[in-house]
Image (tube, coloured by chain):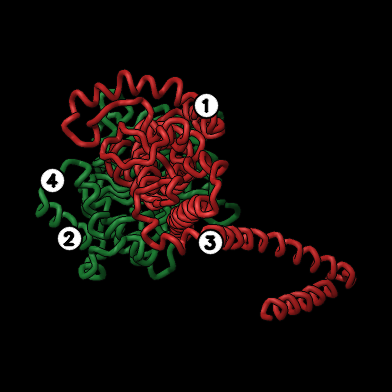
Chain colours: A green, B red
Amino acid sequence: MIQRAIDGRETSAATAVKVRVSHLDVYYGSNHAIRDASLDIEENQVTALIGPSGCGKSTFIRAINRLHDLTPSARVSGKVELDDVDIYSRDVDPIVMRRRVGMVFQRPNPFPMSIYDNVAYGPRVNGERNASRIAVLVEDSLRHAALWDEVKDRLSESGVALSGGQQQRLCIARVLSLRPEVILMDEPASALDPIATAKIEELIAELREQYTVVIVTHSMAQAGRVSDRTAFFLNGSIVEAGPTNQIFTRPKERRTEDYITGRFG
Amino acid sequence: MSIELDSHRTLTAARGRAAQRGLTTRQAVADRAFRVALLGATLLFVALVAGLFIELVHGSWESIVTFGAGFLWSSEWNPVTNHFGALPFIYGTLVSSAIAIVIAGVVGISAAVFLAEFAHPVVARPVSFFIELLAAVPSVVFGLWGLFVLAPILGHTVEPFIQRYLGFLPFFSGPIYGVGLFTAGLLLALMIVPTVSAIARDLIQAVPNELREASIALGATRWETATRIVLPSARSGIVGACVLALGRALGETIAATMVIGNRPAISASLFAPGYTLSSVIANEFTEATSSIYLSALLELGLILFVVSVVVNGCARILMWSMLRSQGRRS
Protein backbone atom coordinates (compact mmCIF):
# COMPACT_ATOMS: atom_id res chain seq x y z
CA MET A 1 0.00 0.00 0.00
CA ILE A 2 2.65 2.43 1.10
CA GLN A 3 4.86 1.11 -1.65
CA ARG A 4 2.21 2.14 -4.14
CA ALA A 5 2.02 5.60 -2.64
CA ILE A 6 5.77 5.83 -3.02
CA ASP A 7 5.52 4.65 -6.60
CA GLY A 8 3.09 7.52 -7.13
CA ARG A 9 5.73 9.87 -5.84
CA GLU A 10 8.28 8.76 -8.31
CA THR A 11 6.18 9.44 -11.39
CA SER A 12 6.47 13.19 -10.91
CA ALA A 13 9.66 13.51 -8.99
CA ALA A 14 10.41 16.75 -10.81
CA THR A 15 8.17 18.88 -8.57
CA ALA A 16 9.03 19.68 -4.98
CA VAL A 17 7.23 18.03 -2.09
CA LYS A 18 5.46 20.65 0.04
CA VAL A 19 3.85 18.42 2.62
CA ARG A 20 5.09 14.93 3.36
CA VAL A 21 2.80 12.78 5.46
CA SER A 22 4.43 9.63 6.74
CA HIS A 23 2.91 6.78 8.70
CA LEU A 24 0.05 8.89 10.00
CA ASP A 25 -2.39 7.27 12.42
CA VAL A 26 -5.37 9.10 13.89
CA TYR A 27 -7.56 7.70 16.64
CA TYR A 28 -10.83 9.06 18.00
CA GLY A 29 -10.98 7.33 21.36
CA SER A 30 -10.74 3.68 20.41
CA ASN A 31 -11.74 4.28 16.79
CA HIS A 32 -8.72 3.93 14.53
CA ALA A 33 -9.74 6.45 11.85
CA ILE A 34 -6.51 6.71 9.83
CA ARG A 35 -4.21 3.75 9.52
CA ASP A 36 -0.58 4.22 8.59
CA ALA A 37 -1.22 6.71 5.80
CA SER A 38 1.67 8.19 3.84
CA LEU A 39 1.34 10.74 1.08
CA ASP A 40 3.49 13.35 -0.61
CA ILE A 41 1.71 16.55 -1.50
CA GLU A 42 3.50 18.47 -4.19
CA GLU A 43 3.99 22.18 -4.42
CA ASN A 44 1.69 24.16 -6.73
CA GLN A 45 -0.37 21.14 -7.52
CA VAL A 46 -3.95 20.31 -6.69
CA THR A 47 -4.13 17.01 -4.85
CA ALA A 48 -7.58 15.43 -4.61
CA LEU A 49 -8.46 12.97 -1.87
CA ILE A 50 -11.26 10.66 -2.99
CA GLY A 51 -13.01 7.70 -1.42
CA PRO A 52 -16.34 6.64 0.02
CA SER A 53 -17.93 8.49 2.97
CA GLY A 54 -16.32 7.79 6.31
CA CYS A 55 -13.06 6.57 4.81
CA GLY A 56 -10.98 9.18 6.65
CA LYS A 57 -10.38 11.83 3.98
CA SER A 58 -11.54 14.68 6.22
CA THR A 59 -9.72 13.26 9.22
CA PHE A 60 -6.56 13.11 7.13
CA ILE A 61 -6.80 16.68 5.89
CA ARG A 62 -7.54 18.00 9.38
CA ALA A 63 -4.32 16.40 10.59
CA ILE A 64 -2.38 18.62 8.17
CA ASN A 65 -3.06 21.78 10.17
CA ARG A 66 -3.50 20.17 13.57
CA LEU A 67 -7.21 20.78 13.89
CA HIS A 68 -7.42 17.54 15.86
CA ASP A 69 -5.78 19.46 18.71
CA LEU A 70 -9.27 20.81 19.43
CA THR A 71 -10.81 17.38 19.92
CA PRO A 72 -9.83 16.01 23.33
CA SER A 73 -10.52 12.40 22.30
CA ALA A 74 -8.39 12.58 19.14
CA ARG A 75 -4.85 11.24 19.09
CA VAL A 76 -2.40 11.60 16.23
CA SER A 77 0.83 9.75 15.60
CA GLY A 78 3.21 9.76 12.66
CA LYS A 79 4.80 12.69 10.89
CA VAL A 80 3.41 15.56 8.85
CA GLU A 81 6.29 17.55 7.42
CA LEU A 82 5.74 21.00 6.01
CA ASP A 83 8.88 21.99 4.10
CA ASP A 84 10.69 19.17 5.90
CA VAL A 85 9.69 20.29 9.40
CA ASP A 86 7.37 18.01 11.35
CA ILE A 87 4.41 20.16 12.40
CA TYR A 88 3.77 17.85 15.35
CA SER A 89 7.24 18.30 16.80
CA ARG A 90 7.57 20.12 20.09
CA ASP A 91 9.18 23.26 18.79
CA VAL A 92 6.49 24.01 16.22
CA ASP A 93 3.88 26.50 17.40
CA PRO A 94 0.58 25.35 15.89
CA ILE A 95 -0.66 28.95 15.81
CA VAL A 96 2.24 30.01 13.59
CA MET A 97 1.98 26.87 11.49
CA ARG A 98 -1.72 27.39 10.78
CA ARG A 99 -1.01 30.75 9.18
CA ARG A 100 0.88 28.83 6.51
CA VAL A 101 -1.78 26.13 6.11
CA GLY A 102 -5.29 27.47 5.53
CA MET A 103 -8.50 25.51 5.66
CA VAL A 104 -11.80 25.81 3.82
CA PHE A 105 -14.62 23.80 5.36
CA GLN A 106 -17.42 21.69 4.00
CA ARG A 107 -20.21 24.04 4.97
CA PRO A 108 -19.58 27.73 4.36
CA ASN A 109 -18.86 29.13 7.82
CA PRO A 110 -18.45 32.91 7.64
CA PHE A 111 -18.19 34.59 11.03
CA PRO A 112 -21.27 36.52 12.12
CA MET A 113 -19.62 39.84 11.31
CA SER A 114 -19.24 42.08 8.26
CA ILE A 115 -17.75 40.86 5.00
CA TYR A 116 -14.77 43.14 5.57
CA ASP A 117 -14.19 41.94 9.13
CA ASN A 118 -14.44 38.32 8.03
CA VAL A 119 -11.48 38.77 5.71
CA ALA A 120 -9.62 41.10 8.08
CA TYR A 121 -9.94 38.63 10.98
CA GLY A 122 -6.93 36.50 10.02
CA PRO A 123 -4.48 39.40 9.65
CA ARG A 124 -5.84 41.02 12.80
CA VAL A 125 -5.41 38.01 15.07
CA ASN A 126 -1.99 37.57 13.60
CA GLY A 127 -0.93 40.98 14.80
CA GLU A 128 -1.57 43.25 11.83
CA ARG A 129 -2.64 46.63 13.25
CA ASN A 130 -2.11 48.91 10.26
CA ALA A 131 -5.55 49.73 8.85
CA SER A 132 -4.39 50.58 5.34
CA ARG A 133 -2.38 47.37 5.04
CA ILE A 134 -5.43 45.43 6.22
CA ALA A 135 -7.59 47.21 3.64
CA VAL A 136 -5.17 46.20 0.89
CA LEU A 137 -5.14 42.60 2.09
CA VAL A 138 -8.94 42.49 2.22
CA GLU A 139 -9.34 43.83 -1.30
CA ASP A 140 -6.64 41.58 -2.74
CA SER A 141 -8.06 38.52 -1.06
CA LEU A 142 -11.61 39.22 -2.18
CA ARG A 143 -10.42 39.86 -5.74
CA HIS A 144 -8.39 36.70 -5.69
CA ALA A 145 -11.44 34.75 -4.47
CA ALA A 146 -13.47 36.25 -7.37
CA LEU A 147 -15.85 37.91 -4.94
CA TRP A 148 -14.72 41.55 -4.99
CA ASP A 149 -17.00 42.74 -7.78
CA GLU A 150 -20.03 41.26 -6.09
CA VAL A 151 -19.40 42.69 -2.63
CA LYS A 152 -17.25 45.82 -3.02
CA ASP A 153 -20.25 48.12 -2.40
CA ARG A 154 -21.45 46.29 0.70
CA LEU A 155 -18.36 45.34 2.62
CA SER A 156 -19.97 46.40 5.88
CA GLU A 157 -22.91 44.04 5.47
CA SER A 158 -22.97 40.75 7.33
CA GLY A 159 -21.09 37.88 5.73
CA VAL A 160 -23.89 35.56 6.80
CA ALA A 161 -26.33 37.39 4.49
CA LEU A 162 -24.48 36.29 1.32
CA SER A 163 -25.62 33.35 -0.79
CA GLY A 164 -24.08 29.95 -0.10
CA GLY A 165 -21.64 30.13 -3.00
CA GLN A 166 -20.63 33.67 -2.08
CA GLN A 167 -20.18 32.62 1.54
CA GLN A 168 -17.82 29.87 0.47
CA ARG A 169 -15.80 32.27 -1.68
CA LEU A 170 -15.74 34.63 1.31
CA CYS A 171 -14.30 31.78 3.36
CA ILE A 172 -11.67 31.23 0.66
CA ALA A 173 -10.87 34.96 0.70
CA ARG A 174 -10.56 34.73 4.48
CA VAL A 175 -7.96 31.99 4.06
CA LEU A 176 -6.14 33.90 1.30
CA SER A 177 -5.82 36.97 3.53
CA LEU A 178 -3.02 35.22 5.41
CA ARG A 179 -1.17 34.41 2.17
CA PRO A 180 -0.86 30.77 3.19
CA GLU A 181 1.35 28.28 1.40
CA VAL A 182 -1.01 25.34 1.55
CA ILE A 183 -4.82 25.50 1.27
CA LEU A 184 -6.80 22.56 2.54
CA MET A 185 -10.35 22.21 1.29
CA ASP A 186 -12.79 19.78 2.84
CA GLU A 187 -15.50 19.13 0.24
CA PRO A 188 -15.74 22.87 -0.40
CA ALA A 189 -18.56 22.58 -2.94
CA SER A 190 -20.68 19.85 -1.41
CA ALA A 191 -23.23 22.31 0.00
CA LEU A 192 -23.43 24.39 -3.19
CA ASP A 193 -25.49 24.36 -6.37
CA PRO A 194 -23.84 23.49 -9.74
CA ILE A 195 -23.20 27.10 -10.77
CA ALA A 196 -21.60 28.00 -7.46
CA THR A 197 -19.63 24.75 -7.66
CA ALA A 198 -18.32 25.67 -11.11
CA LYS A 199 -17.12 29.02 -9.75
CA ILE A 200 -15.30 27.35 -6.88
CA GLU A 201 -13.69 24.90 -9.28
CA GLU A 202 -12.49 27.72 -11.55
CA LEU A 203 -11.09 29.40 -8.50
CA ILE A 204 -9.20 26.26 -7.48
CA ALA A 205 -7.62 26.12 -10.92
CA GLU A 206 -6.35 29.68 -10.43
CA LEU A 207 -5.19 29.16 -6.86
CA ARG A 208 -2.93 26.37 -7.99
CA GLU A 209 -0.55 28.86 -9.59
CA GLN A 210 0.39 30.33 -6.23
CA TYR A 211 -0.67 27.79 -3.67
CA THR A 212 -0.51 24.11 -2.92
CA VAL A 213 -4.08 22.87 -2.75
CA VAL A 214 -5.42 19.70 -1.14
CA ILE A 215 -9.08 19.05 -1.77
CA VAL A 216 -11.30 16.39 -0.30
CA THR A 217 -14.14 15.50 -2.61
CA HIS A 218 -16.74 12.81 -2.84
CA SER A 219 -17.27 13.61 -6.51
CA MET A 220 -14.89 11.78 -8.80
CA ALA A 221 -15.91 14.04 -11.65
CA GLN A 222 -14.75 16.99 -9.57
CA ALA A 223 -11.48 15.29 -8.73
CA GLY A 224 -11.01 14.65 -12.45
CA ARG A 225 -11.74 18.26 -13.34
CA VAL A 226 -9.67 20.10 -10.74
CA SER A 227 -6.80 17.93 -9.61
CA ASP A 228 -3.34 17.09 -10.84
CA ARG A 229 -2.87 14.25 -8.43
CA THR A 230 -5.30 11.96 -6.66
CA ALA A 231 -5.13 9.76 -3.60
CA PHE A 232 -7.75 7.08 -3.07
CA PHE A 233 -8.78 6.41 0.53
CA LEU A 234 -10.56 3.33 1.78
CA ASN A 235 -11.30 2.45 5.41
CA GLY A 236 -8.75 4.90 6.76
CA SER A 237 -5.89 3.82 4.49
CA ILE A 238 -4.51 5.25 1.30
CA VAL A 239 -4.97 2.54 -1.31
CA GLU A 240 -3.30 4.33 -4.15
CA ALA A 241 -1.95 7.75 -5.03
CA GLY A 242 -0.62 9.20 -8.25
CA PRO A 243 -1.26 11.55 -11.15
CA THR A 244 -5.00 11.97 -11.59
CA ASN A 245 -5.16 10.72 -15.18
CA GLN A 246 -3.24 7.62 -14.26
CA ILE A 247 -5.48 6.87 -11.25
CA PHE A 248 -8.56 7.36 -13.38
CA THR A 249 -7.44 5.45 -16.46
CA ARG A 250 -4.85 2.91 -15.34
CA PRO A 251 -5.26 2.33 -11.60
CA LYS A 252 -2.80 -0.19 -10.25
CA GLU A 253 -5.07 -1.47 -7.52
CA ARG A 254 -8.17 -3.51 -8.14
CA ARG A 255 -10.03 -1.68 -5.34
CA THR A 256 -9.29 1.69 -6.90
CA GLU A 257 -10.61 0.48 -10.22
CA ASP A 258 -13.74 -0.89 -8.61
CA TYR A 259 -14.38 2.45 -6.92
CA ILE A 260 -13.62 4.53 -10.00
CA THR A 261 -15.87 2.44 -12.18
CA GLY A 262 -18.65 2.69 -9.64
CA ARG A 263 -18.77 -0.87 -8.44
CA PHE A 264 -19.01 0.34 -4.82
CA GLY A 265 -18.93 3.51 -2.75
CA MET B 1 -66.24 33.01 17.12
CA SER B 2 -63.16 32.38 15.09
CA ILE B 3 -61.98 29.87 17.66
CA GLU B 4 -65.21 27.98 17.21
CA LEU B 5 -64.82 28.04 13.43
CA ASP B 6 -61.29 26.78 13.76
CA SER B 7 -62.20 23.97 16.05
CA HIS B 8 -65.04 23.01 13.75
CA ARG B 9 -62.63 22.86 10.86
CA THR B 10 -60.19 20.89 12.99
CA LEU B 11 -62.89 18.45 13.91
CA THR B 12 -63.94 17.97 10.30
CA ALA B 13 -60.34 17.48 9.28
CA ALA B 14 -59.81 15.07 12.16
CA ARG B 15 -62.83 13.10 11.06
CA GLY B 16 -61.51 13.00 7.51
CA ARG B 17 -58.15 11.76 8.70
CA ALA B 18 -59.81 9.33 11.07
CA ALA B 19 -61.88 7.97 8.23
CA GLN B 20 -58.79 7.59 6.09
CA ARG B 21 -57.01 5.69 8.80
CA GLY B 22 -60.10 3.61 9.45
CA LEU B 23 -60.68 5.11 12.89
CA THR B 24 -64.15 5.49 14.36
CA THR B 25 -65.90 8.79 14.97
CA ARG B 26 -65.67 8.04 18.67
CA GLN B 27 -61.90 8.19 18.46
CA ALA B 28 -62.07 11.43 16.52
CA VAL B 29 -64.23 12.87 19.28
CA ALA B 30 -61.75 11.71 21.90
CA ASP B 31 -59.07 13.35 19.83
CA ARG B 32 -60.99 16.58 19.89
CA ALA B 33 -61.72 16.40 23.60
CA PHE B 34 -58.02 15.97 24.27
CA ARG B 35 -57.23 18.96 22.11
CA VAL B 36 -59.77 21.11 23.93
CA ALA B 37 -58.40 20.02 27.30
CA LEU B 38 -54.88 21.01 26.29
CA LEU B 39 -56.09 24.33 24.93
CA GLY B 40 -57.94 24.93 28.20
CA ALA B 41 -54.82 24.25 30.24
CA THR B 42 -52.87 26.66 28.09
CA LEU B 43 -55.48 29.39 28.28
CA LEU B 44 -55.56 28.99 32.05
CA PHE B 45 -52.04 30.45 32.26
CA VAL B 46 -52.95 33.41 30.11
CA ALA B 47 -56.03 33.98 32.25
CA LEU B 48 -53.91 33.68 35.39
CA VAL B 49 -51.48 36.41 34.34
CA ALA B 50 -54.30 38.67 33.17
CA GLY B 51 -56.32 37.99 36.32
CA LEU B 52 -53.35 38.73 38.55
CA PHE B 53 -52.82 42.04 36.83
CA ILE B 54 -56.49 42.99 37.04
CA GLU B 55 -56.66 42.00 40.69
CA LEU B 56 -53.56 44.05 41.52
CA VAL B 57 -55.00 47.11 39.78
CA HIS B 58 -58.31 46.57 41.53
CA GLY B 59 -56.68 46.17 44.95
CA SER B 60 -54.45 49.19 44.56
CA TRP B 61 -57.15 51.38 43.05
CA GLU B 62 -57.69 53.39 46.24
CA SER B 63 -54.01 54.20 46.43
CA ILE B 64 -53.80 54.99 42.70
CA VAL B 65 -56.69 57.44 43.00
CA THR B 66 -55.44 59.02 46.23
CA PHE B 67 -51.77 59.52 45.35
CA GLY B 68 -51.89 59.52 41.55
CA ALA B 69 -48.61 59.36 39.66
CA GLY B 70 -46.90 61.11 42.57
CA PHE B 71 -46.83 57.72 44.30
CA LEU B 72 -43.93 56.78 42.05
CA TRP B 73 -41.64 59.63 43.11
CA SER B 74 -42.72 60.43 46.63
CA SER B 75 -40.27 59.22 49.26
CA GLU B 76 -42.55 59.52 52.21
CA TRP B 77 -43.76 56.25 53.72
CA ASN B 78 -45.75 57.07 56.80
CA PRO B 79 -48.46 54.66 57.93
CA VAL B 80 -49.35 56.97 60.82
CA THR B 81 -50.34 59.89 58.61
CA ASN B 82 -51.36 57.59 55.76
CA HIS B 83 -48.91 59.17 53.32
CA PHE B 84 -47.34 56.64 51.01
CA GLY B 85 -44.73 56.92 48.27
CA ALA B 86 -42.85 54.18 46.43
CA LEU B 87 -39.57 55.86 45.55
CA PRO B 88 -37.33 54.44 48.33
CA PHE B 89 -38.50 50.93 47.50
CA ILE B 90 -38.09 51.37 43.77
CA TYR B 91 -34.63 52.79 44.44
CA GLY B 92 -33.67 49.94 46.77
CA THR B 93 -34.94 47.32 44.36
CA LEU B 94 -33.18 48.81 41.34
CA VAL B 95 -29.88 49.50 43.09
CA SER B 96 -29.59 46.12 44.82
CA SER B 97 -30.53 44.34 41.57
CA ALA B 98 -28.10 46.45 39.56
CA ILE B 99 -25.25 45.56 41.93
CA ALA B 100 -26.31 41.93 41.70
CA ILE B 101 -26.44 41.78 37.92
CA VAL B 102 -23.11 43.55 37.44
CA ILE B 103 -21.32 41.13 39.76
CA ALA B 104 -23.26 38.04 38.61
CA GLY B 105 -22.83 39.02 34.96
CA VAL B 106 -19.06 39.33 35.16
CA VAL B 107 -18.57 36.22 37.30
CA GLY B 108 -21.24 34.11 35.58
CA ILE B 109 -20.13 34.84 32.03
CA SER B 110 -16.48 34.26 32.93
CA ALA B 111 -17.36 30.92 34.48
CA ALA B 112 -19.49 30.01 31.47
CA VAL B 113 -16.68 30.79 29.02
CA PHE B 114 -14.24 28.79 31.07
CA LEU B 115 -16.57 25.82 31.41
CA ALA B 116 -17.67 25.77 27.78
CA GLU B 117 -14.43 26.65 26.03
CA PHE B 118 -11.44 25.84 28.16
CA ALA B 119 -12.18 23.37 30.94
CA HIS B 120 -11.60 19.69 30.40
CA PRO B 121 -14.91 17.77 30.62
CA VAL B 122 -13.64 16.03 33.75
CA VAL B 123 -13.56 19.44 35.46
CA ALA B 124 -16.42 21.10 33.61
CA ARG B 125 -19.09 18.52 34.42
CA PRO B 126 -18.87 18.48 38.22
CA VAL B 127 -18.31 22.24 38.42
CA SER B 128 -21.35 22.92 36.24
CA PHE B 129 -23.31 20.55 38.44
CA PHE B 130 -22.33 22.43 41.58
CA ILE B 131 -23.11 25.80 40.08
CA GLU B 132 -26.56 24.54 39.19
CA LEU B 133 -26.99 23.14 42.70
CA LEU B 134 -26.44 26.65 44.00
CA ALA B 135 -29.67 27.60 42.26
CA ALA B 136 -31.51 24.99 44.30
CA VAL B 137 -30.51 26.42 47.69
CA PRO B 138 -33.64 27.99 49.24
CA SER B 139 -33.41 31.74 49.46
CA VAL B 140 -34.05 31.77 53.20
CA VAL B 141 -30.87 29.75 53.65
CA PHE B 142 -29.01 32.30 51.55
CA GLY B 143 -30.62 34.95 53.74
CA LEU B 144 -29.44 33.33 56.98
CA TRP B 145 -25.95 32.90 55.65
CA GLY B 146 -26.03 36.48 54.40
CA LEU B 147 -27.09 37.84 57.76
CA PHE B 148 -24.79 35.82 59.99
CA VAL B 149 -21.73 35.33 57.79
CA LEU B 150 -21.65 37.70 54.83
CA ALA B 151 -22.91 40.86 56.53
CA PRO B 152 -20.38 40.73 59.44
CA ILE B 153 -17.50 40.04 57.03
CA LEU B 154 -18.52 42.91 54.81
CA GLY B 155 -19.22 45.21 57.74
CA HIS B 156 -15.99 44.55 59.62
CA THR B 157 -13.50 43.99 56.85
CA VAL B 158 -14.50 44.54 53.24
CA GLU B 159 -16.52 47.73 53.45
CA PRO B 160 -14.07 49.58 55.75
CA PHE B 161 -11.30 48.55 53.38
CA ILE B 162 -13.16 49.90 50.33
CA GLN B 163 -14.03 53.05 52.25
CA ARG B 164 -10.44 53.68 53.26
CA TYR B 165 -9.33 53.86 49.64
CA LEU B 166 -12.48 54.89 47.76
CA GLY B 167 -14.34 56.70 50.53
CA PHE B 168 -14.12 60.00 48.64
CA LEU B 169 -16.75 58.60 46.26
CA PRO B 170 -20.28 59.20 47.53
CA PHE B 171 -21.27 55.52 46.99
CA PHE B 172 -18.71 54.37 49.51
CA SER B 173 -19.13 57.11 52.13
CA GLY B 174 -21.14 57.23 55.33
CA PRO B 175 -21.54 54.89 58.27
CA ILE B 176 -21.14 51.14 57.81
CA TYR B 177 -23.71 48.78 59.25
CA GLY B 178 -22.88 45.49 57.55
CA VAL B 179 -26.43 45.15 56.31
CA GLY B 180 -27.38 47.43 53.44
CA LEU B 181 -27.75 47.81 49.70
CA PHE B 182 -24.28 46.51 48.91
CA THR B 183 -24.68 43.41 51.06
CA ALA B 184 -28.07 42.71 49.54
CA GLY B 185 -26.67 43.20 46.03
CA LEU B 186 -23.79 40.83 46.68
CA LEU B 187 -26.08 38.18 48.16
CA LEU B 188 -28.49 38.51 45.25
CA ALA B 189 -25.51 38.17 42.89
CA LEU B 190 -24.67 34.82 44.47
CA MET B 191 -28.25 33.71 44.08
CA ILE B 192 -28.53 34.61 40.39
CA VAL B 193 -25.05 33.62 39.27
CA PRO B 194 -26.18 30.04 38.49
CA THR B 195 -28.88 31.38 36.16
CA VAL B 196 -26.38 33.50 34.27
CA SER B 197 -23.64 30.93 34.04
CA ALA B 198 -25.81 27.89 33.25
CA ILE B 199 -27.73 29.61 30.46
CA ALA B 200 -24.68 31.40 29.11
CA ARG B 201 -22.77 28.11 29.06
CA ASP B 202 -25.54 26.41 27.08
CA LEU B 203 -25.66 29.30 24.63
CA ILE B 204 -21.89 29.30 24.20
CA GLN B 205 -21.98 25.57 23.56
CA ALA B 206 -24.70 26.16 20.98
CA VAL B 207 -22.33 28.30 18.89
CA PRO B 208 -21.52 26.15 15.84
CA ASN B 209 -18.20 24.39 16.16
CA GLU B 210 -17.36 25.26 12.55
CA LEU B 211 -16.87 28.87 13.64
CA ARG B 212 -14.33 27.86 16.28
CA GLU B 213 -12.49 25.65 13.82
CA ALA B 214 -12.45 28.38 11.18
CA SER B 215 -10.97 30.79 13.69
CA ILE B 216 -8.37 28.34 14.96
CA ALA B 217 -7.46 27.41 11.39
CA LEU B 218 -6.73 31.09 10.72
CA GLY B 219 -4.07 31.07 13.40
CA ALA B 220 -6.17 32.51 16.22
CA THR B 221 -5.57 31.31 19.77
CA ARG B 222 -8.31 29.68 21.83
CA TRP B 223 -8.62 32.91 23.78
CA GLU B 224 -9.02 35.04 20.63
CA THR B 225 -11.54 32.54 19.31
CA ALA B 226 -13.56 32.68 22.53
CA THR B 227 -13.58 36.46 22.87
CA ARG B 228 -13.80 37.52 19.22
CA ILE B 229 -15.93 34.82 17.65
CA VAL B 230 -17.77 32.71 20.22
CA LEU B 231 -18.88 35.37 22.69
CA PRO B 232 -20.08 37.83 20.03
CA SER B 233 -22.04 35.00 18.38
CA ALA B 234 -23.78 34.27 21.67
CA ARG B 235 -24.05 37.90 22.75
CA SER B 236 -27.77 38.52 22.39
CA GLY B 237 -28.59 35.27 24.15
CA ILE B 238 -26.18 36.03 26.99
CA VAL B 239 -27.69 39.47 27.42
CA GLY B 240 -31.04 37.67 27.59
CA ALA B 241 -29.71 35.36 30.31
CA CYS B 242 -28.53 38.36 32.32
CA VAL B 243 -31.89 40.08 31.98
CA LEU B 244 -33.63 36.89 33.07
CA ALA B 245 -31.36 36.77 36.13
CA LEU B 246 -32.08 40.44 36.73
CA GLY B 247 -35.77 39.56 36.78
CA ARG B 248 -35.08 37.07 39.52
CA ALA B 249 -33.07 39.59 41.54
CA LEU B 250 -35.84 42.19 41.24
CA GLY B 251 -38.43 39.88 42.73
CA GLU B 252 -36.30 38.12 45.33
CA THR B 253 -37.88 38.78 48.71
CA ILE B 254 -36.69 36.91 51.71
CA ALA B 255 -32.91 36.99 51.28
CA ALA B 256 -32.97 40.68 50.40
CA THR B 257 -35.22 41.40 53.37
CA MET B 258 -32.80 39.72 55.74
CA VAL B 259 -29.73 41.72 54.74
CA ILE B 260 -30.84 45.04 53.25
CA GLY B 261 -31.61 46.79 56.54
CA ASN B 262 -35.26 47.55 55.81
CA ARG B 263 -35.17 51.32 56.08
CA PRO B 264 -37.21 53.30 53.54
CA ALA B 265 -34.50 55.86 52.84
CA ILE B 266 -32.57 56.95 49.80
CA SER B 267 -28.90 57.39 50.40
CA ALA B 268 -26.10 57.83 47.91
CA SER B 269 -23.98 55.37 49.85
CA LEU B 270 -24.24 51.71 48.88
CA PHE B 271 -23.29 50.82 52.46
CA ALA B 272 -26.45 52.43 53.82
CA PRO B 273 -29.54 50.35 54.60
CA GLY B 274 -32.37 50.34 52.09
CA TYR B 275 -35.62 48.62 51.39
CA THR B 276 -37.01 46.78 48.37
CA LEU B 277 -40.51 46.58 46.94
CA SER B 278 -40.89 42.93 47.76
CA SER B 279 -39.39 43.27 51.26
CA VAL B 280 -41.77 45.99 52.34
CA ILE B 281 -44.76 44.02 51.10
CA ALA B 282 -43.63 40.92 52.96
CA ASN B 283 -42.81 42.83 56.14
CA GLU B 284 -45.81 45.10 56.37
CA PHE B 285 -48.88 43.43 54.92
CA THR B 286 -49.80 41.88 58.28
CA GLU B 287 -49.80 45.25 60.00
CA ALA B 288 -51.54 47.14 57.21
CA THR B 289 -54.58 48.12 59.23
CA SER B 290 -56.08 50.89 57.14
CA SER B 291 -57.42 50.16 53.70
CA ILE B 292 -55.26 52.87 52.11
CA TYR B 293 -52.15 51.29 53.67
CA LEU B 294 -53.03 47.90 52.20
CA SER B 295 -53.89 49.51 48.91
CA ALA B 296 -50.48 51.24 48.81
CA LEU B 297 -48.74 47.93 49.45
CA LEU B 298 -50.71 46.35 46.63
CA GLU B 299 -49.67 49.18 44.35
CA LEU B 300 -46.04 48.40 45.19
CA GLY B 301 -46.87 44.84 44.15
CA LEU B 302 -48.32 46.14 40.91
CA ILE B 303 -45.15 48.10 40.17
CA LEU B 304 -43.02 45.05 40.87
CA PHE B 305 -45.28 42.87 38.72
CA VAL B 306 -45.10 45.22 35.74
CA VAL B 307 -41.32 45.66 36.01
CA SER B 308 -40.74 41.90 36.31
CA VAL B 309 -43.02 41.02 33.43
CA VAL B 310 -41.39 43.58 31.17
CA VAL B 311 -37.86 42.51 32.16
CA ASN B 312 -38.63 38.82 31.69
CA GLY B 313 -40.39 39.46 28.41
CA CYS B 314 -37.33 41.29 27.07
CA ALA B 315 -35.08 38.46 28.23
CA ARG B 316 -37.13 35.80 26.44
CA ILE B 317 -37.28 37.80 23.23
CA LEU B 318 -33.50 38.29 23.25
CA MET B 319 -32.81 34.61 23.78
CA TRP B 320 -35.37 33.44 21.25
CA SER B 321 -34.02 35.76 18.62
CA MET B 322 -30.54 34.37 19.09
CA LEU B 323 -31.58 30.74 18.96
CA ARG B 324 -33.77 31.42 15.94
CA SER B 325 -31.01 33.15 14.02
CA GLN B 326 -28.74 30.19 14.74
CA GLY B 327 -31.43 27.81 13.62
CA ARG B 328 -31.49 29.63 10.31
CA ARG B 329 -27.78 29.19 9.91
CA SER B 330 -27.82 25.45 10.25
Foreground disc of the pair 4, 1: 1
User: Counting other residues with Cα less than 10 Å from the Cα at mark 1, is it few (<14), some (14-19), or many (20 or more)?
Assistant: few
Q: Nearer the viewer, residue B187 or B123?
A: B187
Please say if A24 is above or below B205.
above
Determine if marks 3 and 1 fall on one subunit. yes
The residue where tag 2 is placed is A139
The chain letter for the residue carrying disc 3 is B
The residue singled out by tag 1 in the image is B126
Q: Residues within 10 Å of mark 3 (few under 14, many from 20)?
A: some
Q: CA distance from mark 4 to mark 1?
A: 41 Å
Q: Amino acid at mark 4?
A: Arg
Do callouts 2 and 3 point to residues on the same chain?
A: no
Same chain for labels 4 and 2? Say yes or no: yes
Could you give the CA–CA distance between mark 1 and mark 2, rounded to whole angstroms? 48 Å
Chain letter belonging to callout 4: A
Same chain, marks 4 and 1?
no
Image coordinates for residue B59, horizontal then vertical, percent: 56, 58
Residue B222 disc label? none
Q: Residue at x 46, y 38 (%)?
A: B192
Residue A129 badge: 4
Mark 2, other Cα within 10 Å: few <14 / some 14–19 / many ≥20: many
3 or 4: mark nearer the eye: 3
Tell me what residue is drawn at x 89 percent, y 69 percent: B26
The residue pinned by badge 3 equals B57
The reply to whether callout 3 and callout 1 are in contact (CB within 8 Å) is no
Quick one: quadrant of the N terminus of chain B? bottom right
